[in-house]
Image: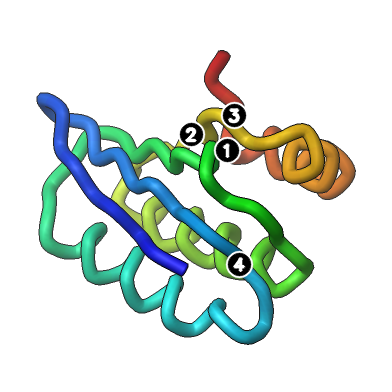
Amino acid sequence: MQVKAKVNNDTLILSVEGELDQHTASAVKNELDAHMSKVYARQVILDLSNLEFMDSTGIGVLIGRYKKMKEKNVPIFILNPSSHIDRILNMTAIYQIMPKLN
C-alpha cells in the first residue's frame, strides 16, 4: 500500500496504490489525512488507477475523508477506478458525494 501526493495549481491529487482493506485502512487514512492537512487545495482528486483491491473498510476510509473535506468546503473527486472498484463505488452510491471524473 502506498499513497502518493502531488499538487497541480489548486488541486491536490492523491494516488492510492495497492490494497485498501482492513489491514491497510489505518495507514491509508493516516497518510491521506497528513497530505490533506498540509496542503490548501480547492479540490481533491483521489486517483484510484493503481488500487488493486478495496473492501467495505476502504469505503469507510473514503467516506471519512469526504466528511473531513466537506467541513472545509473542499470537494473530492474519484479518478480512474478499475472496473471492480468502480462497481463497488457504484453499488455504494459513493459517486453521489464524490463524483467520478471521466
Question: Crowdedness of circle 4 by 10 Å Cα count: few (<14), some, many (20+)?
Answer: many
Q: Determine the image quadrant of residue 20.
A: bottom right
* Residue 2 position in % (x across, y down): 39, 64
Q: Is residue 98 left or right of residue 42?
A: right
Q: Helix, strand or loop at disc 1?
A: loop
Q: For residue 57, what is the image quadrant?
A: bottom right
For residue 20, the mark is 4
Residue that badge 3 annotates:
99
Residue that appears at 51% across and 30% down: 79
Q: Are marks 4 and 1 in contact (CB under 8 Å)?
A: no
**Which amino acid lies under the numbered mark 4 shown in the image of this protein?**
Leu
Pointer 4 with pointer 3, Cβ within 8 A? no
In the rendered image of this protein, does residue 74 appear above or below residue 19? above
Residue type (three-letter) at the residue carrying disc 1:
Met
Q: Position of residue 4 (x, y in %)?
A: 29, 53
Mark 3 nearby-residue class (10 Å; few <14, some 14–19, many ≥20) = some
Label 2 secondary element? strand
Closer to the observer: label 4 or label 1?
4
Mark 4 or 3: in front is: 4
The foreground one among 10 and 71 is 10
Percent from the top left, x then y, of residue 93? 79, 41
Tag 2 and tag 3, C-beta contact below 8 Å:
yes
Q: Which mark is residue 98?
A: 1
Q: Nearer the viewer, residue 90 or 74?
A: 90
Amino acid tagged 3: Pro
Write down the residue under mark 2.
Answer: 77
